[in-house]
Image: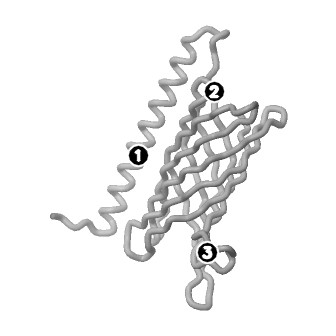
């Protein structure tokens, strides 16, 4: 069995992320093409743009006293098929706060990934089930994989849909500097179209 060095792991991760992004791009282009073939009266697909802020911690009652907390700022761009299912690419700036002994350590990472969302209308209230997978793309020593599942409730203000959500976030590092973390997350977002 071959042990991969840090540089090899980074190259392997970058290669896998390129493949995921290529698949997402192909799916989005396929959706755009098939949507363009439909008549204008049947057209229900649209572009998907969402801004999102998520705060997550390890489930303790006070996030200031927790050993680890995240503040994520995301832009999600993709395509919504038939007003139910969306496929998107999230770009996330993640700021992590770690309490190391008596000092706090802040690190920032940029993540790129792929996500999907399924929308349900429950008594004229939109509910969204959101699943996303992402990986760090910056060359810092604390690189990790992140998976998130959120349940979001939305409203309507003109053409925008503000959302509030709750869910879980799992972070798995590529090295032994950090430990695996399962976090409880809360999100505020706005779907622009």
Marks 2 and 1 sit apart, C-alpha to C-alpha, by 27 Å
33 or 149, nearer to the observer: 149
**Mark toward the viewer: 2 or 1:** 2
Q: Secondary structure at mark 2?
A: loop
Q: Residue 67, how many percent across, how many down?
A: 58, 79
Q: Residue 2, how many percent across, how many down?
A: 18, 64
**Circle number at residue 97:** 3
**Circle number at residue 18:** 1
Q: Residue 87, how many percent across, how many down?
A: 54, 36
118 or 7, nearer to the observer: 118
Pointer 3 local density, CA inside 10 Å: few below 14, some 14–19, many at least 20:
many
Q: Secondary structure at mark 3?
A: strand
Check disc 2 and report the residue beneath it. Answer: 83
Measured along the vertical axis of the image, is residue 166 above or below residue 100? above
As drawn, which residue projects farthest toward the left?
1
Q: Quadrant of residue 40?
A: top right
Q: How is the image coloured?
A: one colour
Q: Quadrant of residue 38?
A: top right
């Amino acid at each position: 069995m071959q042990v991969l060095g840090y540089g090899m792991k980074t190259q392997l991760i970058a290669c896998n992320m390129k493949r995921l992004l290529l698949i997402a791009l192909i799916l989005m282009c396929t959706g755009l093409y098939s949507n363009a073939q439909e008549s204008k009266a049947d057209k229900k697909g649209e572009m998907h743009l969402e801004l999102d802020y998520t705060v997550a911690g390890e489930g303790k009652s006070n996030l200031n006293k927790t050993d680890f907390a995240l503040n994520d700022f995301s832009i999600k761009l993709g395509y919504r098929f038939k007003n139910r299912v969306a496929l998107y690419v999230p770009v996330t700036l993640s700021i992590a706060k770690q309490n190391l002994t008596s000092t706090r350590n802040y690190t920032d990472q940029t993540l790129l990934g792929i996500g999907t969302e399924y929308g349900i209308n429950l008594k004229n209230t939109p509910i969204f089930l959101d699943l996303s997978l992402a990986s760090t793309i910056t060359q810092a020593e604390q690189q990790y994989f992140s998976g998130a599942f959120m349940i979001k409730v939305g409203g309507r203000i003109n053409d925008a849909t503000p959302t509030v959500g709750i869910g879980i976030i799992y972070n798995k590092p590529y090295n032994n500097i950090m430990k695996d973390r399962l976090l409880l997350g809360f999100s505020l977002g706005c779907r622009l179209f």
